[in-house]
Amino acid sequence: MFSVSSISKKKTFLCVLDHSLGVLGQAGSIQKDIKARKVITELLKVQTKSFDELMAMDPRKLMNELETVFNISSEIAKGIVTTGDEFKKIEHFNLDLGYAMNTVLSTDVPGLMNSLKSESFRDALMICKMGTVKVVVDFFKAMTSASSNDLNKIRALKEHGKEVKECLNSIVANKTELNTTVADIYQFKLISGARDFCNNFYNDFSYFTGFHENILLMKNLATKAKRIWKMPHLKDRVSKMGQLLETISDHDNEPKPDLCAGFIGVDDTAKILEDVKSPWFQKEISKGKSTKDLEKALEPFGKFAKKLGEFKKIWVKFDGGIRQEGVFAREMSALLDVVENYSGLDNAEKFLKEAAASYKKTWNDSRNQPFDAKPLYQFDKKLKTVNEILTFAREIEMLCKQLVKEFDFITLAHVLNEIEKLDLSKSEIKDLQEAINGVKHYDTLRGFFKDFVTFSLHQTKLNNLHGSLGDDFTTIVADGTAFIKNSSFSQMLNARSYDTLKFDETLQFFRKLMKFDDSSKKEAKNHFETFENLKNEYFKLEEFVKTLGSTSSALIVDFRNASNLAHTYGRGVHVFRDISEAYKRKDAIFKLLEELVTLEKSMKPFVSKDFETLRQALNTAVNVTGLRGFEYGFRDILDQLSIPNRLNKTYRDPAIENSKQLADLDLDFSSHRGDLLAASMSFDNIREEFNTMFGLNPKNEKTEGILDDRLSEESETHRERFKILDREVTQWSKAMAKGEMPYLYGVYVAIVMKEQKNVFYIASIVNAHGGTMCEGFPMKEDYNIGSHPYLHAHLGPLFLISDGSTDLTLYKNDPDKMYTILTEDEFVHLLLKREINRDTKLDPIQATKESDD
């Protein structure tokens, strides 16, 4: 019996021979330049360009230069007892002081407060009118009510449909609504911030008055550093290393199968001779003919497989820590960026000495006495109320952003329009509920309205707080602000005792420099030694691979169309490998279990006898969708877990290990249906090539009738191809568009070909999926400039399917971008890709100057 799990074993001969296609089949590459690095990086699934640049680096030289920085840091830090937390407190105090020194409070506080108290300010924060939100909430609750008292609450949605749609527009444009409040909120925050800093000053009075001692500490460090500092010039190289380490194993940058298209993994390289010698291969492929020449031609790859397996172990060790190495390189680069860009060391000692003296004089002034804060009691209460108002405004803003992200507002508007057309005059509430529930996509609107309950609560709290500001709000805040402005504290701030920004630059230099401590030095050495070992072993393997070019066999080299066949077949088999591997690991992927079991049960009882086995298996595998949008989701999870974090080690380590087990699986099988179908269609070509290799092609057959049969077969193939395409697009188009509109809605198609043999199949697909076939050539003057297909907002609405026999340059370069020019294959590819780029405008421009309906 044939099963998913058995496919991965019985397909090995194809992996092997297609590996010969992919690697050996490129005759020029083998005889002149075997592209060793590309072969190895492709097998290891690492980006070749990043790998090239990484191998060009000298890890030993980098570490030697970095060691100088560590030594200088150690010398400067001698005798320093200040901790990292204390340095951080110095940093925060200095920045807060600088902010307070440079804050200029509004000169028209009464006018500012009147603005904050106004209804227009309140309404802008609410985004939608409270009455409109209440209509929606009442309607939402009434739709599950059995009381006749709620009849009018349901009807109210229809009566206030215009206001509800205005609310939708406001939610989409929430940023525009809130922009009118930004300036006033900023000015209020300055007043609130000045009051907070004033509190901090008197709550930590001794730290304020003694801060000059911290400035002198920086001065002492500058004195020591000036004697021994040497600029390292390492930042760019370490930064580059970090970038390469991030991209080298990122699956988004993973090389597509090319030279090694037929290999499913590194381990398959060791199975070449084993598979060629197998009874199955002898019976089904070579048909009893001798395979000795082929075995001899493949012998070098047995040696290559062994060495590659050894190198893979080193790579796995390196790759296991590569995420940590990426973090290390980023952190080291950030430290070096600050250290190397600091240019004030020559003058730092003098600056810090003067800054300490000036600060001490200013803040030890006789005026520096705590003041009575009782006059600010009411002032503080008003500030608290406004800050609470802004908190609820922020909640409303975040809710609006979430709604915009989750819902299609065009669909919501369409549903509201349909509800407005309903007859809601019946007296039974269940009749109204049934009528509204029957509106297409009402479930989407219901989900949207559900969040309006929270929306209404935030609005109510905001409104109540705003109403509690009182008539004395403006006077109290204006008087409190004047009190702070006239205090001795503000006068000392205005003295600006030293340049806080210049002090921060010096502080950051020493903070970053002292992070080059002994523990960091040990970590750096470990990373660079691992890097150096990998590089040395890699170059040994690369030299060996280069020798394979001189031992290649013409039997392999002469395999026609090897690269194309391996690529077409290999991509499909790679997808199938993920499916079969997922089946073997079903216990770890509970969400996939049902689909995979369904696939296993639906498999025909294949017997591994010929190519048709895998062809049927691949066609069956098309039905497995996996986890849509998840792709290499576990690899992304592994990346996040591997970054240093505060997760409990007891839970984190098992999660990392589990993610490793699944990291190499692309679990969004639905996105590869085109690859599976293309692989299935490549079997005839592969069979023909093997028949040629072993002399199994029929000879001296009469040619009469063959051409007609061939053309008939080709026509049948085209029909089958478009049937498959139509079936595939039908299955996913509704899901991708969530049933809102057909996939080709708003697309107008014209065929520009001399031979239009497939026009019927193209037309049937276009019409079935909401597009329109043009009777003649579409002229853009008959359509609305700036329009796009609704689910393809990046394309022009007029699709010209061309065979290249007609010059369409004029239309390709159309300044209004109204034409989308595709070959027949590109059109098929567009449909198989299943991508959606939705037009998010509430009122998109339709293509025709008359209604699309």
Image (tube, helix red, strand yellow):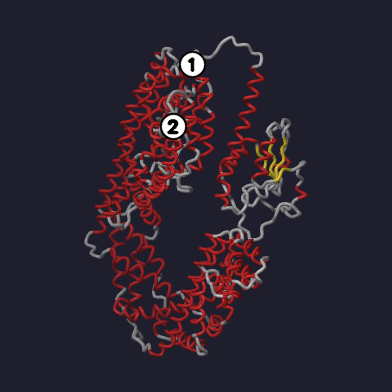
Indicate whether 557 appears above or below 68.
above
Give the CA distance from mark 1 to mark 2.
27 Å
Circle 1 Cα neighbour tier, 10 Å, few/some/many (<14 / 14–19 / ≥20): some
Q: Is residue 231 visible?
A: no
Indicate whether 442 appears above or below 102.
above
SS category of the residue bearing label 2: helix
SS category of the residue bearing label 1: helix
Amino acid bearing label 2:
Lys
Residue reaching furthest left? 79
> Which picture quadrant has residue 587?
top left
Left or right of residue 42, residue 65 in this image? left
> Which picture quadrant has residue 700?
top right
Amino acid bearing label 1:
Met
From the viewer's side, name the closer residue of 591 and 656: 591
Left or right of residue 820, residue 178 in this image? left
Q: Is residue 635 visible?
A: yes
Mark 1 or 2, nearer chain start:
2
Residue visible at 58% across and 63% down?
437
Residue visible at 52% across and 87% down?
474
From the viewer's side, name the closer residue of 349 and 611: 611
Residue assigned mark 1: 693
> Where residue 505 appears, x then y in whole percent?
39, 63
Residue assigned mark 2: 38
From the viewer's perspective, is the residue at label 1 or at label 2 nearer? 1
Circle 2 Cα neighbour tier, 10 Å, few/some/many (<14 / 14–19 / ≥20): many
Indicate whether 317 appears above or below 70.
above
**Quadrant housing the N terminus:** top left
From the viewer's side, name the closer residue of 479 and 285: 285
